[in-house]
Structures are given as C-alpha cells and as structure tokens.
Image (spheres, coloured by chain):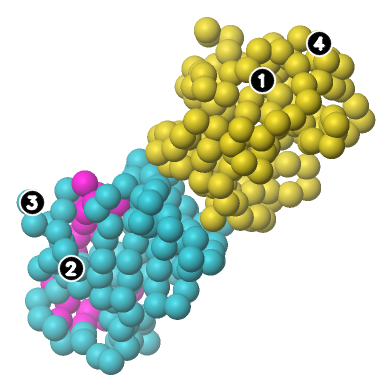
Chain colours: A yellow, B cyan
Amino acid sequence: MGIEIERKFLVIDQGYRSDDSTLLRQGYLSTVKERTVRVRVAGEKAFLTIKGITEGSKRSEYEYEIPVTDAVEMLDELCEPPLIEKRRYRTVHEGMVWEIDEFFGDNEGLTLAEIELNEEGQAFERPAWLGEEVTEDRRYYNANLVSHPFSKW
Amino acid sequence: MGIEIERKFLVIDQGYRSDDSTLLRQGYLSTVKERTVRVRVAGEKAFLTIKGITEGSKRSEYEYEIPVTDAVEMLDELCEPPLIEKRRYRTVHEGMVWEIDEFFGDNEGLTLAEIELNEEGQAFERPAWLGEEVTEDRRYYNANLVSHPFSKW
C-alpha cells in the first residue's frame, strides 16, 4: 500500500503551462467514497488504481499497471459513463512537483492543481498562478466529477 | 480481456472431495452487477478480478495478480464487509475441470460446483454428485452472497 497525501487548488491563470503534458482518459468501476476503483489510460500506459476514503488530505492508494488494450475495453464497455478526459501539465516549483489538470467534455472550464506531499502539514512555496485551496471540497474529487460534472454546478 | 463462460450447480453429496483444495478469502470493491471488482487471496497468491454483466452463462473478465500483502490490506480495510471465505476443491470428470466451493461463515451450508466452458452450449458429462443447475439464479453470485448470505435466505 501507499498513503497518498495530496492538496488540491484552483488556478488563477495558465502560468503553469509547458510542453510537458499528457492526455489522460479515465473512468470508474466504483465511485463509492470508501473504495474508488479507477481505470486510466495515460499516453502509452494504463493503470488500475484503488483508493480508500479521504481523511483530511490523506488516502490509501494501490496502483497496478495493466495492458492498455484491457484499459481501453474497460473504459468503453464497463466503466460508469461519462468518462473523464483531461490534459495534465507537470511543472516543478521550488523543488516540488505540481500536476495541473485541464478538464474537457462535461467538466470543460475546470482546472485543478495538485501537489503530493510526504507528510501532512509539509510546507511548500505557492506558485504565482495558484488559486484557492479545495482539498476538502468533495465536488472536486474526480470520482464525483463523473456524476456531478462541473458544467452542471 | 477474457470471456468467461461458466455454468453453476448445487451438489447432492460430497463425492467431489479430494486432497486438492485451496482456502479462498475474497471481498468486493464493487458488487454492482455491471462491474464487479473482486480481491481474492488464494493460498500463496492474490488477484484483482473485474467482471462485467452476465449474459446467460457469459461474462467479460479481467484478472491481474497483485501482491498478497496489498490484497490482505484491501480485504481487511477497504472491501465491503463481510468477506467470503470458502474451500475450493478441484476435480476432473471426463476430461473437464470442476471447481466446487464449500462456503463458511454467513454462507455456511452452501456448496456450489462450477464448470468453465469454451463456448456456450458445449456438452459435458454430469458427475454423479451434481445437483440442480443455478447458473441463472442471481442469489448464487458470489457478489450477492456478501449482502444476502445463504444463512438469511
């Protein structure tokens, strides 16, 4: 197991944009908050990811690489519609990695920035493009963006 | 992907018993019939298995081996309680493999025999211990034996 400690933010501009981005296509086999199961195709790779319930900014996580052909079939035939599609930018600020997701489709217009920490309460520098923190707001969970997409808020 | 074609039966006696048996401990991350996600520890190995909806005796299936330590944690901390525990016997009859599950716990008293076929309608010889067919009876799906165990029927 891993424990994922993550904080999530809105952005105020596109200052994070770079050439380092990947198209992500993902869907869910379970969106129940106690046990989400995600299928994701990320460029040339695919993953099955299981996460437990979020407590503050902490969450248990198990991730396994799977064949891309399996993942594509599961996304098209098994996952709860609609799928989530987003472009993920990756940038480093003061030694910390930020991942910024620009959503498409039913979540068009939403952009979320995430930072993964080694421990809760760990300090980090805020990039200039960073906006309001939304770590504790469940509407921004990707699993919830399937049933309640940003366009319907 | 694989397509699983399986028929399921009750038994009338224990004529299937042999020394070839394995203790299985399994739980579910999703019991939704369109997409079940099962965690199973089988002896020294563990698997994550995703199955689609059953149509007749056919079902899509994806199975991945995972570390036993991950599986044990997921069973104990993430899966929907209660877990399913059963002893699986394996026997060959007229060239076909039968798997017979004797359930414990909340499903004590239930025994189910399964045969996996290469195609729907494939002929096979019935062993003397075989009882009524229950392939189409949803109560006997393992995912349903979690929420509606045999002891409560």
Say whether disc 3 or disc 2 marks the residue closer to the N-terminus. 2
Crowding around mark 1 (Cα neighbors within 10 Å: few <14, some 14 to 19, many 20+) is some
Q: Return the residue at label 3.
A: B152
Crowding around mark 3 (Cα neighbors within 10 Å: few <14, some 14 to 19, many 20+) is few
Crowding around mark 2 (Cα neighbors within 10 Å: few <14, some 14 to 19, many 20+) is some
Q: Nearer the viewer, mark 1 or mark 3?
A: 1
| Kind of residue indicated by mark 3 | Lys
Q: Return the residue at label 2.
A: B104
> What is the chain identity of the residue bearing mark 3?
B
Crowding around mark 4 (Cα neighbors within 10 Å: few <14, some 14 to 19, many 20+) is few
Give the magenta part as a residue range: B120-147
| Kind of residue indicated by mark 4 | Asp
- The image quadrant of residue A132 is top right
> What is the chain identity of the residue bearing mark 2?
B
Rendering coords of residue B85 (x, y %): 26, 66
3D distance between C-alphas at marks 1 and 3: 48 Å
Callout 1 touching callout 4 (CB < 8 Å):
no
Residue under the point 54% across and 26% down: A141
3D distance between C-alphas at marks 3 and 2: 14 Å
Q: Return the residue at label 1.
A: A9
Q: Residue furthest right?
A: A19
- Is residue A81 rendered to the left or right of residue B53? right
Question: Are the residues flagged by discs 1 and 3 from a single subunit?
Answer: no
Residue under the point 31% across and 47% down: B80
Task: Tell me the tag on residue A13.
Answer: 4
| Kind of residue indicated by mark 2 | Phe
